[in-house]
Image (cartoon, helix red, strand yellow):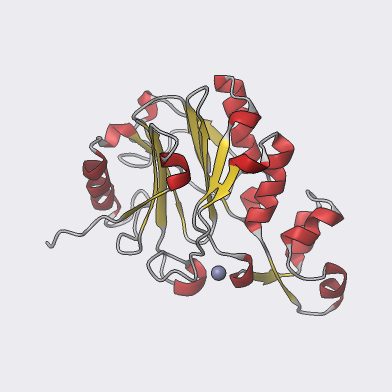
Amino acid sequence: MMDREMVLYGVKALEEMGNIAAFYTARNTPVWKYGRDGALENCSLLLSKLGISAGDMVMAEQEHTNKVRTVSRKDGGDMVLRGSPVGAYDGMVTDEKGLLLATVEADCVPVYLYDPLRQAIGMVHSGWRGTVEQIAPNAVSRMAAEYGSRPEDIVAVFGPCICAECYEVGTELIDIFSAQYSKEELNSIFLEDLSFARQEKGAKVHLDIRSAIRISLLQSGLTEDNIKDVGRCTKESPELCSWRRDQPLRQSMLTGIMML
Ligand SMILES: [Zn+2]
């Protein structure tokens, strides 16, 4: 078998802060989910590139939940070598060095979290469902409860995801988001004039998931300056996996963070 090149794009905003590896993968290694053909091979390639073993990596059993799991070394290998012992979760936090937290996405928003003072990290998968249900704020609260993190010290970075211009959705999502966000906030979460869009039958609107997550993280106490964005659209980047562009192919990008 030919060796496949493992492409890792670094998340500079975090790696510049020091002892952090934060990255996302390319479309040439599109299979990561536990149990799928080729997933373990891709994990092995990744692990050897990072110089760690499978016991140093935890992935999430993702089902668009808002659940965040606190993980440590003893959980290493979950969703890599074996299934999840605790059911589904879409985010993880840890304060252990050398433990890689990884989620997979194909248009959803990967949110990397780092508290440089308390030395804690988080990795969150936030699609529209997890966003409405506040998974990123849940991870911030968990870091505060477990590690004493202050929200104003936490840096959040949005990895590549589908941009608002590329993300057309049905108007039913306006009602779903209105359960969590104010009218004024909805105006920055959707690109359209909503009073108009709602009246039109079969109308489509464009959803800016990152805007919704940003609003929620600010409410959690993160500062404007500490919410960053790699600014890359998955659908518009042929080298990245995108469900909207590539369906029915079930391919995904792996996003990971680890303290060195
Ligand atoms: Zn786009």
Give x and y (percent) for residue 214. 67, 48
Q: Nearer the viewer, residue 229 or 80?
A: 229
- Residue 89 visible in the current orientation: no
Residue 224 in the image: above or below residue 244 = above
Query: Can see residue 23?
Result: yes
Quadrant of the frame with the C terminus: top left
| Residue 240 percent location from the top left of the image | 41, 64
Query: Horizontal placement of 124 versus 210: left or right?
Result: left
With respect to residue 157, does 106 lie above or below?
below
Residue displayed at 68% across by 64% down: 207
- Location of residue 168 in the rendering, given as x and y in whole percent from the top left corner: 65, 72
Residue that protrudes farthest toward the bottom in the picture: 201
Left or right: residue 47 compared with residue 193: left
Quadrant of the image where one finds ligand 1: bottom right
Q: Residue at x 86, y 56 (%)?
A: 183
Q: Nearer the viewer, residue 155 or 58?
A: 155
Number of marks in the rendered image: 0
Most extreme residue toward the left is: 1
Quadrant (top left, top right, bottom left, bottom right) of the N terminus: bottom left
Q: Is residue 84 above or below residue 26?
A: above
In this view, 192 is above or below 99: below
User: Which residue sits at x=56%, y=37%?
Assistant: 155
Q: Nearer the viewer, residue 238 or 70?
A: 238
Tell me residue 149's x, y (percent).
Answer: 59, 24
Q: Is residue 124 left or right of residue 145?
A: left
